[in-house]
Image (spheres, grey):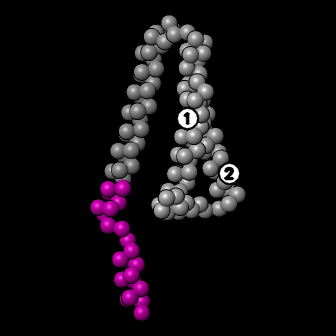
């Protein structure tokens, strides 16, 4: 009986290649993240001279719905869908014969809410 138990424990151990590949993937993701942060910091440092001539008041006056409204619409859509899920539980959706449950249903509902808000900004702009 103990021999079978020992064989089962050995079978559950991950292989050396699996551990090495997991470490390699983590190193690649960490390196990629550092490169992105450095590139963004460098771009911000280099572009400060180019942004001095931009009149922000005029920019927001002309493009307010796009600059402020669209991000706010995304956050509001996320809050509405999250609130609906928190109050009602798991979502399921059946539209025109297409049925989805769980996370895909949430993504579809969020997309619909965001699209409606975006179209309303476009209609009022």
Q: In this view, does 49 lie above or below 21?
A: above
Q: Is residue 23 at least partly visible in the picture?
A: yes
Mark number, residue 52: none
As drawn, the residue found furthest toward the bottom would be 1
Q: Is residue 82 above or below residue 100?
A: above
As drawn, the residue found furthest toward the top would be 53
What's the magenta region?
Answer: 1-22
Q: In the shown orientation, is residue 37 left or right of residue 24?
A: right
Q: Quadrant of the C terminus?
A: top right
Q: Do the residues labelled 1 and 2 touch (CB within 8 Å)?
A: no
Across and down, in percent, residue 57 comes to 60, 12
CA separation in Å, label 1 and label 2: 22 Å
Q: Between residues 89 and 48, which one lies in front from this camera angle?
A: 89
The residue sitting at 42% across, 21% down in the picture is: 43
Q: Between residues 109 and 4, which one lies in front from this camera angle?
A: 109
The residue sitting at 44% across, 15% down in the picture is: 47
Q: Is residue 110 above or below residue 34?
A: below
As drawn, the residue found furthest toward the right would be 87
Across and down, in percent, residue 102 comes to 54, 61
Q: Between residues 70 and 122, which one lies in front from this camera angle?
A: 122
The residue sitting at 36% across, 56% down in the picture is: 22
Report helix, strand or loop for mark 2: helix
Q: Name the residue under label 1.
A: 119
Q: Is the magenta stretch mostly helix, strand or loop?
A: helix
Across and down, in percent, residue 122 comes to 55, 29
Mark number, residue 83: 2
* The stretch drawn in magenta includes residue 25: no
The residue sitting at 65% across, 45% down in the picture is: 79
Quarter-of-image position of residue 60: top right
């Amino acid at each position: 009986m103990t021999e079978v138990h020992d064989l089962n424990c050995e079978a559950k151990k991950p292989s050396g290649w699996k551990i090495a590949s997991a470490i390699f993937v983590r190193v690649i993701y960490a390196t990629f993240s550092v490169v992105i942060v450095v590139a963004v910091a460098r771009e911000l440092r280099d572009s400060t001279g180019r942004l001095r001539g931009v009149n922000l008041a005029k920019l927001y006056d002309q493009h307010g719905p796009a600059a402020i409204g669209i991000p706010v619409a995304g956050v509001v859509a996320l809050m509405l869908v999250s609130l609906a899920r928190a109050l009602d539980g798991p979502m399921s959706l059946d539209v025109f014969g297409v049925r989805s449950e769980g996370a895909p249903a949430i993504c579809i509902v969020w997309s619909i809410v965001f699209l409606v808000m975006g179209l309303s900004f476009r209609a009022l702009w």
